Amino acid sequence: MQKTTTAYKMLNGSLPIVFDAYIGQGAFDAFVEGSKLPAVVYFHGGGLVCGNRESFFPTWLLERVLGLGFVFLSADHQLMPAATGHDIVQDMKDLFSFIKEKEISGLGKCIRVDADKIVVAGSSAGGLLAFLAGIHCTPRPKAVISCFGMGGDMLIPAYFTPKTKPFFMSRPLQDPGSFLDFTYPFQQERPGPISDSPIGFNPPNHERPGAPSTRRQMVVSMYLQLGTWLDYYTGAHDPSLSQNLLHAAQSEAGLKKLRDYIPAEHRPLFPQLNVDSSFPPTFMIHGNKDTAVLIDESCNLKTSLEKAGVPVKLIEVEGQEHFFDIMPGSAEKYKKEFEQVKAFLVQILNA
């Protein structure tokens, strides 16, 4: 396998934002100069607040993509805060422009991606970005693969309702007072631009074994705990979009029209508000016991895509939590489901 890291943009002239490109040895050896290869562009999880291109990495997907002779790209993007979803969408657009116009450097051959044969994929928040890429990027991706992705319905109470008891894997609630530098109106120094925040977990002998060990990982759950994640995502703090949605949801009439409370400038960030017949064919896989991203999101988007006449498939994995696909033993346990993803790729990229 050949791997290289490439900067696809420079933020403020000084912060490189990069992607890793993986090419199977067979495809690399057989590559003919001047030709182009289909690709899967993958976006990582982390609530858009933490992580990088190596976080929660789906080895099962990488192996299948490379086995088919395609390129696998795993991309970083700006993180919230200081970025908003609008900034991250621009990153994706810039990534696609780079892929369309440039070769992948550092491999000893002029490897080019066929920009007309790209599938976007993502896990958790990366699934949200895959949906958004399918809507906003040019050339439009051929298809979308979402693994327990956010974005299927971000108007459910889970996003804007404050939590008073543990809600994700029974992890304790966070103390917002410990994160004033991450909390609007940023009473301490506001975080600067960042696109790479490695994740970590406590060792088995820790008092909280397996719990997140980096601040940004805890910030993700804190935003969801406070019911303000959408404020940081859109940048709509004053007035608070989350508060407006919460107040509307408290009345039956308002609950039925929550989409009307999304300002026009932020509607492009909500995949469910941008579904039409041009949406790429979509494959979703989601555990039905997921406490981080409810399976209701994937079910809602599936229904919307079906109504729009878009080919869509959802595999509900019985009894599984968030990121079940990277747990020990998952490669064999879910081989049947993963092979269906491979078959989808063959159908789309070999067409």
Image (cartoon, rainbow, N blue to C red):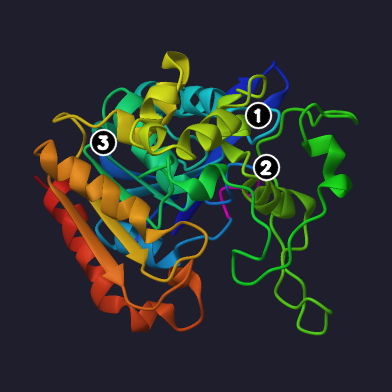
Classified by dominant secondary structure, the portion drawn in magenta counts as: loop
Q: Please say if 67 is above or below 158.
A: below
Tell how many labels. Answer: 3
* Crowd band around label 1 with a 10 angstrom C-alpha radius: few (<14), some (14–19), many (20+): some
Question: Which quarter of the figure has residue 76?
Answer: top right
Element type where label 1 sits in the image: strand
Camera-side residue: 350 or 194? 194
Q: Residue furthest right?
A: 188
Mark 2 lies on residue: 196
Q: Where is residue 118 in the image (x, y as percent from the top left)?
A: 28, 38
Going from N to C along the chain, the mark reached first, 2 or 3, is 3
Which of the labelled discs sits on residue 172, or is there none?
Answer: none
Q: Please say if 105 is above or below 351.
A: above
Mark 3 lies on residue: 36
* Crowd band around label 2 with a 10 angstrom C-alpha radius: few (<14), some (14–19), many (20+): many
- Residue type for callout 1: Pro
* Crowd band around label 3 with a 10 angstrom C-alpha radius: few (<14), some (14–19), many (20+): some
Camera-side residue: 3 or 85? 85
- Residue type for callout 2: Asp
Q: Looking at the rendering, in which quadrant would you find the C terminus?
A: top left
* Residues at marks 1 and 3, CA–CA distance in whole angstroms: 25 Å
Question: Which quarter of the figure has residue 31?
Answer: top left
- Residue type for callout 3: Lys
Name which residue lies at 59% across and 71% down.
Answer: 169
* Residues at marks 2 and 3, CA–CA distance in whole angstroms: 29 Å
Tell me if residue 4 can be seen.
no
Name which residue lies at 35% across and 47% down.
Answer: 71
Name which residue lies at 43% across and 41% down.
Answer: 154
Mark 1 lies on residue: 16
Q: Where is residue 309 in the image (x, y as percent from the top left)?
A: 8, 39
